[in-house]
Image: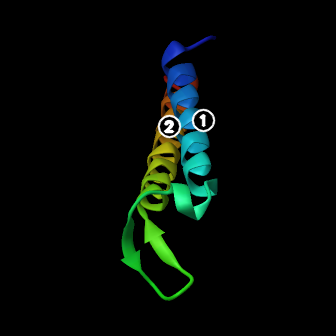
Amino acid sequence: MLQWRVILLATIAVLLLAAGLVALVLPGDSEGPVLYHLDDQHALRFLDVLGGGLLAVGCVVAWISGVVWQRRMYAP
């Protein structure tokens, strides 16, 4: 019943999601250089973009983990 691929993918997904959230929570002065300046109070910085990318990849890996689990559980 233990399927190491599903467990490994789910673990990687959780780590990617956690890293993405940590990158988004950092204060503005430690987020790196400004990539896109929106207005006087808002800007997209390097770690904002990196955090969003990590969250997106984490979601995709979590989805793949669910697909692998379903195919293993309901295989004919």
**Left or right, 30 with reference to 32:** right
Verify CB contact (< 8 Å) between mark 1 and mark 2.
Answer: no
Residue 50 coordinates in the image, percent (x, y): 43, 53
Residue 70 coordinates in the image, percent (x, y): 55, 32
| Disc ID at residue 67 | 2
Q: Nearer the viewer, residue 27 or 73?
A: 27
Q: Is residue 74 above or below residue 37?
A: above
Q: Disc 1 or 2, which lies upstream in sequence?
A: 1
Query: Looking at numbered disc 2 in the image, what kind of residue is underneath it?
Result: Val
Callout 1: SS: helix
**Left or right, 6 with reference to 53:** right
Q: Nearer the viewer, residue 42 or 55?
A: 42
At x 60%, y 35%, the residue is 14
Residue 49 coordinates in the image, percent (x, y): 43, 60
How packed mark 2 is, by other alpha carbons closer than 10 Å (few <14, some 14-19, many 20 or more), is: few
Q: Is residue 30 above or below residue 57?
A: below
Name the colouring of the figure.
Answer: rainbow
Q: Is residue 74 above or below residue 24?
A: above
At x 64%, y 55%, the residue is 25
| Disc ID at residue 14 | 1
Query: Looking at numbered disc 1 in the image, what kind of residue is underneath it?
Result: Val
Quarter containing the N terminus? top right
| Disc ID at residue 24 | none
